[in-house]
Amino acid sequence: MITTLLVANRGEIACRIFRTCRELGISTVAVYSDADAGALHVREADTAVRLPGAAPADTYLRGDLVVAAALAAGADAVHPGYGFLSENAGFARAVQDAGLVWVGPPVKAIELMASKTRAKELMAAADVPLLAPVDPGSATAADLPLLLKAAAGGGGRGMRIVRELASLPAELTAASAEAAGAFGDGEVFAEPYVERGRHVEVQIMADGQGTVWALGTRDCSLQRRHQKVIEEAPAPGLDDGLRRRLHDAAVAAAQAVGYRGAGTVEFLVSAGGRPYFLEMNTRLQVEHPVTEAVFGLDLVALQLRVAEGGPLPAAAPPAPAGHAVEARLYAEDPARDWQPQTGALLTLEVPAEPGIRLDTGYTGGDTVGVHYDPMLAKVIAHAPTRTEAVRLLARALERARIHGPVTNRELLVRSLRHPDFVAGRLDTGFYDRHLTALTAAGAPGEDAARRLAATAAALATAAGAAGGGAGPARLGAWRNLASRPQTRCYRAEPDGTEYEIAYRTGRDGTPAPGTGERVLAARPGAVTLETGGVTRHFAVTTHADRVHVDTTAGSYTFTALPRFTDPAERTEPGSLLAPMPGTVVRLAEGLVPGAAVEAGQPLIWLEAMKMEHRVLAPASGTLTALHAAPGLQVEVGALLAVVQDAPAEAPAHQEETTR
C-alpha cells in the first residue's frame, strides 16, 4: 500500500496528482529547483525537497537526485508525471532498485517504446498500421515532404518538416541538437509527412492481471510547433469501423509489450481515413482530463491502484457520456512566432461554472520564468454534446481574468469559434492556414470595443486621482463639467495600437468622457458606461503602468503612456535585441564581426521555455558587433549583435528589430 508519494515533476501535473493523493489519503512530496522554490506545487505538497540549480538538466532531469529526495523524505512510491524523466527506463529502474514503488509501466515496456524507431518495428510485427521510415541519407525529392522526429522523446522537440531537399542536412543537424538537449539522445529519424492528417490517439489503461481498457479516442490535431493546443474526446467525425480499428490497434500495441498502467497510443489519420501508428507514450498525457470527464474516471487513482498490484474495477471500462474539450493556456504571443512570455502573473481566475475544470500550477502573484514550458493552465469543459462543450469552454476563457504576461487566450477563443473547428474539420495544418486571420487585429467592432475599454481605464484612473468615486455617479452628473478637458494615452497590448482618451471632471469630481458615453458609475476599480442604449460593466485593475480591463465580452491590456517620449529609448538601425529572456545555444557558422549577412538569415539561436527561437538578420549588410556566445544567458532586450550596411566607426546603439 502506498502511503507517501513523491511526484518527480513540477507545475500543473504535480498539483493534479497531489489532488488525487489528498482524496485517497496519501501523503505527498514535491521536488523543486531553485527557480521553483515558491511554486504552487511546492506550496501544495506535504513535504518538499530542493534540487539545487535552475536548469532542468541540473534538477528535474537528475534521476539520482530525485531518488535520493524520495528516500530522504520517507516516500515509498514515485510518480513521474509527464515530460522530464517520465519515459526514462533507467530512472524507472533506479526507483525500483531503491525499493520504491514505480507508478508507471514496466521498465521493459518503457525500453521497447522509448525509441520510436524500435517501437515502429515492434508494431509492424503486431500488424499495427504505420508509415514506412525514410533513410535521410538516401532521401530524394520524391520522398518529400519529410517529418524529422526525435527517437527518444516527444512534445515537439526535435521535430522538423522538410519540404526542400537542400535544407535536409541543416534541419537534421538542428533537430538532432534540439533532441540531444531535451532528451540526452540526438537520434533522429524521418518518415513521410502526411498533409492534412489528423492526430488521433487512444487512451489505454492496463492492470497486472491481463485486462486492457481502450478508453475511447481523443483528437489533438490543433497544434503549434508540433505541440498540442486544443484536445477533445471523443474524436469527432470518425465512423464506427475506424474507431474499432484504432481501439484494436491500441490494445494490440499494449499487449505486445506487456503493458501495465496508463498509456496512450497515437495515430495519424490521413484525409482518406487511413490510420498510421505514430508512437506510444508510456505515461500520463497532458490531455488526460478530457478522457476522465467523458468516462467519469480518475486516471491517476487508477495508476496508483495498478501500481499497488490491484486490478482494474471491471473487465470493461464504463460507458462514455458527453463530450469534453481542453484548451492549453500558454504564456506566449501567437502573433509573434509563438514567442514565450515571462514575468509576474498577477491574476489568474477562470469562472468556476458547472462543467468547467481548471488544472494549473500557478496562482495570482506567481512568476512565469524562463526555464520551463510556458503552459499556465489547462481549462476543460464537459457537456452533453460537442457543440455545448465548445461553447462552454470558449465562454469560460473569454470571461477569465488573466493579468500579466501576454497569453494565447484570445487565439483559443477564436479557434474554438472558427467555422472549421465548429464543424469538426480538423487537421494538423489548422494553424498553418488560419493563424494570420486568427491573430489579426481589426475584427468588426474590435477597435470600438478597445477604445471603450481604454475610456473605462481613463475614467477609473481619474476617479482614483480625485480621491473619490466610491459610489455610483449620479445620473446626469456627467453633464456638470469643468471647462478644461484632460487626456490620457494608452497603448493596447500586444499589438501597439494607441488610444488618446479625453475627459472632463465635473464639480463633484465625477469624470466623464468627451465622446458622449453616459457614466453610470466610476470608481478606481470599476466603471459602468451606457452607450447606444446598452449598459456595460468594466473591471479595471492597475499594476504600475499596466492597466487591465475585464468585461463579459473580452479582456484588454493597456500600457499607460507618458506625455513625452524618453529620448534614451531611441535606438539606431541594425541592432539585434533578445526578444525574450533565454540562453544562447548556438551561432550561425562563421558568424564573426566583419562577416557578410543576408536579410532574414538566422544568426543566433536562443532557448527559452524548452523551445528554440531564431534571431534573424534585420537586413543585408555587415556584422559590426557580436555580443552573443553559446551558453550566455540574456534578458529580454539585451543587445546580441549589430548589422549595418557598412562597418561603423562607433558601436551602434540598440533598436528593437523583427526576428
Image (tube, rainbow, N blue to C red):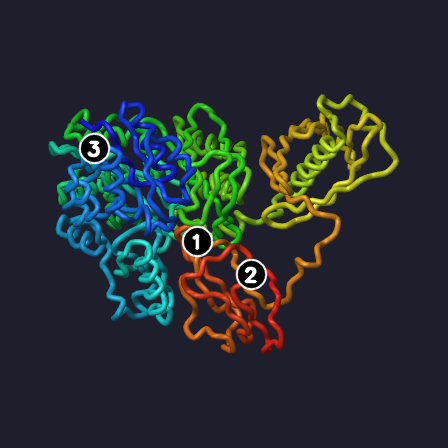
Q: Nearer the viewer, residue 373 or 545?
A: 545
Where is residue 593 drawn, in percent x and y? 51, 75
Where is residue 642 drawn, in percent x and y? 56, 69
Mark 3 lies on residue: 76
Mark 2 lies on residue: 658
Q: Residues within 10 Å of mark 3 (few under 14, many from 20)?
A: some
Q: Amino acid at mark 2?
A: Thr
Mark 1 lies on residue: 608
Where is residue 39 drawn, in percent x and y? 42, 37
Q: Is residue 466 above or below residue 105?
A: above
Quarter residue 534 falls in: top right
Where is residue 321 drawn, in percent x and y? 32, 26
Which circle, 3 or 1, is nearer the viewer? 3
Relative to 412, 300 lies left or right = left
Q: Which mark is residue 656?
A: none
Q: Could you tell which of marks 3 and 1 lies nearer the N-terminus?
A: 3
